[in-house]
Image: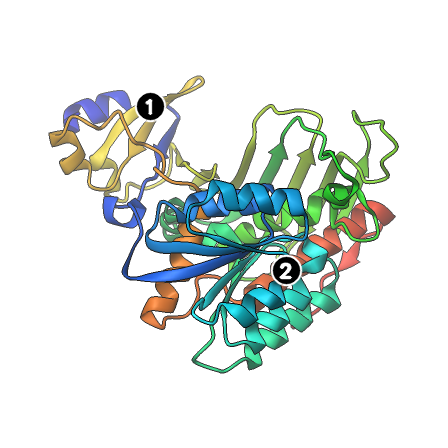
């Protein structure tokens, strides 16, 4: 589309721009040298991690660990050349050449494994949230801060910070394109039960160890909003109920929380296991524009009275319900020459892929992790507080200096 067509087709009251970073940033991750990696915890998330690592050139999963014999046996059979261990300490003792460990066990089991890996001089990627209590999460962050400074890297598994589309959207947000922030909204909608065969697999439904929807899912999205804003909220309130899964559980399958910042801006967050409409997203509404983030995609919706910033000339149009929008794609000239402007408007890989790729590249380049242990602590505590607000019905203060 040329500039004249752009001007003709973008005269609606609200224009939306789909944000996509450069092909290089969104493209495949490659390591300069092969690196042996171990995965501890080979359930659903662990299996996904192994799959994502198989797509990163140079990453080699050479050991897996799980306390469930059947799950461990299946993982070894699925992954050629991998050795299985029932105890992570045996893995660390016998496989000294493995320098990077990814921890994907249930949340409440993270701390002991993190401690052993760090003491053993291993780089650690710990799935989010870090722990099921604030005390355990702080202990993990402290251990990461004191483990062989400069030699051992710890990355928290909050994926938004590694997401190329989110990085680009944040640059727009921080540059003032949204202008004055009015409100934020986010949701996680999925119709599923969180109940699986075998009692050990249902730790998310155990009030003694779970952080609920707010902690296990919401913390990822709370972190995105706090990262965009550059500071934490000051309080959190919540409520929850069982709307669908009346199977004896005591953990709500539907929650609503409100996180409040010191300037009066709030994040309204809803999560449910009873309905899938709308999926997962975060939205930030400003006086000049709104940004909608959906993990593999992001859009900017400019207000009609917002000033032109120059990037619009690289746009093509896209329909958003009743609004005519414009699509922003980095490297638009190259894509147009390839006839690909209508394709590839989302990320080619998952958020988990980019987070794992960043972890391995940080090790290779001796660079700071994309999401530090302290970042992970803050997001984890927000999720824990939100879950406590849901279960107690109280409004809770976020600790100063977190």
Determine whether label 1 and label 2 are within 8 Å by CB: no
Find residue 321 and report its horizontal and vertical position in percent: 45, 18
Helix, strand or loop at disc 1? strand
Find residue 363 and report its horizontal and vertical position in percent: 38, 68
Please report the residue visible at 50 percent of the width from the left and 82 percent of the height from the top: 148
Vertical position of residue 135 compared to residue 334: above or below: below
The local crowd at label 2, few if under 14, some if 14 to 19, many if 20 or more residues have their Cα within 10 Å, is many
Find residue 225 and report its horizontal and vertical position in percent: 55, 51
In this rendering, position of residue 261 left or right of residue 370: right
If the image is split into quadrants, where does the C terminus sit?
A: bottom right
Vertical position of residue 224 compared to residue 397: above or below: above
Frontmost residue, 254 versus 36: 36
Quick check: can you spot residue 11?
no
Frontmost residue, 67 versus 25: 67
Mark 1 → mark 2, Cα distance in angstroms: 39 Å
The residue that mark 1 highlights is 318
In this rendering, position of residue 364 left or right of residue 373: left
Frontmost residue, 375 versus 108: 108
Please report the residue visible at 78 percent of the width from the left and 24 percent of the height from the top: 244
Q: Nearer the viewer, mark 1 or mark 2?
A: 2
The residue that mark 2 highlights is 130
Residue farthest along the left direction in this orientation: 337
The local crowd at label 1, few if under 14, some if 14 to 19, many if 20 or more residues have their Cα within 10 Å, is some
In this rendering, position of residue 79 left or right of residue 280: left
Vertical position of residue 212 compared to residue 373: above or below: above
Please report the residue visible at 53 percent of the width from the left and 37 percent of the height from the top: 281
Find residue 392 and report its horizontal and vertical position in percent: 86, 49
In this rendering, position of residue 42 left or right of residue 62: right
């Amino acid at each position: 589309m040329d500039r004249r067509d752009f001007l003709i087709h973008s005269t609606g009251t609200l224009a939306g721009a789909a944000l996509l970073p450069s092909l290089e940033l969104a493209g495949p991750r490659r390591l300069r040298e092969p690196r042996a990696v171990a995965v501890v915890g080979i359930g659903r998330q662990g299996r996904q991690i192994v799959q994502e690592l198989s797509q990163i050139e140079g990453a080699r999963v050479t050991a897996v660990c799980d306390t469930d014999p059947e799950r461990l046996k299946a993982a070894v059979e699925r992954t050629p050349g991998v050795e299985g261990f029932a105890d992570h300490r045996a893995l660390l003792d016998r496989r000294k050449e493995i320098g990077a460990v990814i921890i994907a066990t249930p949340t409440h089991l993270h701390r002991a494994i993190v401690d052993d890996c760090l003491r053993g001089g291993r780089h650690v990627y710990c799935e989010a949230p870090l722990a099921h209590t604030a005390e355990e999460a702080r202990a993990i962050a402290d251990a990461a801060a004191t483990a062989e400074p400069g030699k051992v890297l710890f990355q928290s598994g909050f994926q938004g910070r590694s997401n190329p589309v989110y990085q680009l959207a944040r640059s727009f947000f921080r540059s003032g394109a949204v202008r004055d922030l009015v409100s934020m909204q986010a949701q996680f909608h999925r119709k599923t039960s969180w109940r699986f065969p075998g009692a050990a697999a249902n730790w998310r439904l155990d009030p003694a160890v779970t952080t609920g929807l707010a902690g296990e899912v919401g913390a990822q999205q709370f972190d995105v909003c706090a990262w965009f804003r550059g500071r934490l909220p000051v309080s959190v309130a919540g409520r929850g109920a069982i709307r669908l899964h009346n199977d004896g559980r005591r953990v709500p399958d539907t929650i609503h929380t409100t996180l409040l910042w010191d300037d009066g801006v709030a994040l309204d967050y809803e999560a449910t296991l009873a309905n899938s409409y709308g999926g997962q997203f975060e939205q930030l509404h400003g006086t000049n524009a709104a940004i909608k983030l959906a993990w593999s995609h992001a859009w900017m919706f400019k207000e009609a009275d917002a000033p032109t910033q120059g990037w619009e000339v690289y746009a093509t149009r896209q329909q958003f319900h009743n609004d005519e929008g414009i699509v922003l794609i980095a490297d638009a000239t190259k894509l147009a020459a390839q006839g690909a402007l209508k394709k590839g408007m989302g990320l080619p890989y998952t958020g988990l892929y980019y987070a794992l790729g960043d972890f391995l590249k940080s090790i290779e380049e001796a660079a700071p992790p994309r999401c530090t242990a302290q970042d992970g602590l803050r997001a984890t505590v927000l999720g824990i507080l939100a879950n406590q607000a849901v279960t107690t019905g109280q409004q809770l203060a976020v600790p100063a200096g977190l």
